[in-house]
Image (tube, helix red, strand yellow):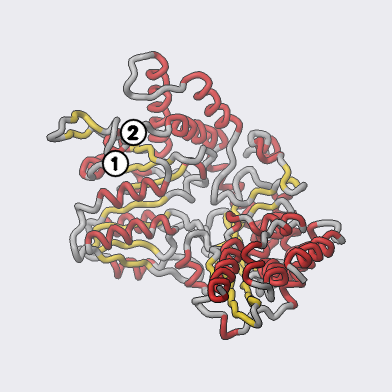
Amino acid sequence: MFKVEDLRHDFPILSRKVNGKPLVYFDNAATSQTPQVVIDTIVDYYSNYNANIHRGVHTLSQEATDLYENARVKIQEHFNAEFAHEIILTSGTTHSINLVANGFKDLLKKSDEVIVSALEHHSNIVPWQMLCEQTGAVLKVIPMNQEGELIMSEYENLLSNKTKLVFVNHISNALGTINPIEDIISKAHEVGAAVLIDGAQACPHLIPDVQALDVDFYVASAHKMCGPTGVGMLYGKESWLKKLPPYQGGGEMIAEVTFEKTSYADLPHKFEAGTPNICGGIAFGAAIEYMNSIGFHNIAQYELELLDYATNQLLSIEGVKIYGTSQHKTSLISFNLEGIHPYDIGAILDKLGIAVRTGHHCAQPIMEFYNIPGTIRASFAFYNTKEEIDMFIEGLKKAKMMLS
Amino acid sequence: MTIKEIQNELIDEFSMFEDWEERYQYMIDLGKDLPLIDAQFKTKDNIIKGCQSKVWVHAEMQNGRVVFTADSDAIITKGIIAILIRTFSNQQPNDIIEANTGFIDEIGLKEHLSPTRANGLVSMIKQLKIYAIAYQTQLN
């Protein structure tokens, strides 16, 4: 197990002050902080390697291409994809989802069915709604229970030979529920449907093995796993990626262009039109290496300790209601204080240097389910400490006193 | 009093506070105390969606002056609304159109009027001005 005090030195931002107070950063589910080694990778890239990739014969271009493709291999190995060309580098999870949704436009017909879950982020609802509007397919929703878990018996009832696609997040960003994706994937495959898993919230906490899961598409963002913003990935089974049409036209994604016809490049370049976020991709690889150097097993174990500690501390405050009480949860707590608007709590915590997220977390259907305007969400990473949780609890008590 | 005079008065009031806690406590109390809007005006039409907190605004003309009432579901937002209503309500449309909100910076509440705060207040001020413009047009 790592020593959190030592590890915090890897993150320069953790020593800054906010509003005169030491920063307590509990908004990790929105974006994680960046370790020095990733910052160094970015600086090193622009200082020593900056060039466009895949086309130059000059040394810089070749070195940059090697670094970029090497990052793709790191990502492939991390997710245990069979081939590196099954990893498409995108601008992030939202881009990845839209790429797949767009690809299915020609594959869906009227009366086909698409299933999403009640726990989805807007980015995993809207693209499918748009897809269904365009194709005439029908969108079905797996309902959730009071604990914030998907009701699997209802899911099974929704599945039929009309089901073509299933889209579920691995972990809910609003509630922290870990969904039983193995089961979801195998049941979908029984009726011949493809499955996309949104892993944005899962990848900071665990390693999804895409081959063991037998998942068709898996998407994630670098900035939630110690990498930079503006880069993410789409894993797709080779057979699916070959079937889907390109998303954007441009340079890099073509094999041959005449005004009569263009033939597309092989995977992965078919889906990577234009100059990609080269530096971002390389830094994504460095972030994955950094997290693996700490060890995901250690990360998960430590974060669960933080979750238990914070949950117990929170429940000792009168009037706290936690939303999302599944036994299978990641280190994230969504809650409210009775009679107090989450925005008010967030504003006061900010004055105390404590960063939490307040609002509907881009998951309005979940807020409607509980009939609340939003929640306060505290999400912990492996570099957070119990002392920080104590400061957060003190802050909440102060906010409660001021507001009631 | 003119808008400027009221704003100066508020700056004076807030200058007595030593730290943010006192300022916030005062603002929270302002938010709690004021009955801001008649229930019949808390309608969907009068709502300004601020993403995080909701704001309702109603305006009517009384004796050549625009009277605003407003409310929010968050108490800190409501406190700021109380301050804004105090400066903008019961003023002549033209004065409202020309008024600015720089005094909010001076009383140390700047962060609440940031467009990124998504609490509906920036849109609310816009809405107050739009009402004033509409009433001014009627007067002309």
Q: Residue at x 52, y 47 (%)?
A: A205
Residue A174 point in image, percent of width and height: 51, 60
Q: Residue at x 27, y 65 (%)?
A: A159
- Label 1: chain letter: A
Q: Considering the numbered disc 1 on the image, is that residue within a helix, a strand or a loop?
A: loop
**Crowd rating for badge 1 (residues with CA inside 10 Å; few <14, some 14–19, many 20+):** some
Callout 2–callout 1 Cβ contact below 8 Å: yes
**Crowd rating for badge 2 (residues with CA inside 10 Å; few <14, some 14–19, many 20+):** few
- Label 2: chain letter: A
Residue A201 point in image, percent of width and height: 48, 51
Q: Quadrant where the C terminus of chain A lies?
A: bottom right
Q: Residue furthest front?
A: B140
Q: Residue at x 67, y 65 (%)?
A: A344
Which kind of residue does numbered mark 1 sit on? Gln
Res A340 → quadrant? bottom right
Which kind of residue does numbered mark 2 sit on? Gly
Residue A169 point in image, percent of width and height: 42, 55
Q: Can residue A375 be seen in this snapshot?
A: no
Q: Quadrant where the N terminus of chain A lies?
A: top right
Distance of label 2 from label 1 (alpha carbons): 9 Å
Q: Can residue A53 be seen in this snapshot?
A: yes
Residue B65 point in image, percent of width and height: 65, 77
Q: Considering the numbered disc 2 on the image, is that residue within a helix, a strand or a loop?
A: loop
Q: Which mark is residue A274?
A: 2
Nearer to me, A271 or B114: B114
Nearer to me, A281 or B35: B35
B81 sits left or right of A366 in the view:
right
A154 sits left or right of A78 in the view:
left
Q: Which mark is residue B62?
A: none
Q: Mark 1 = which residue?
A: A248
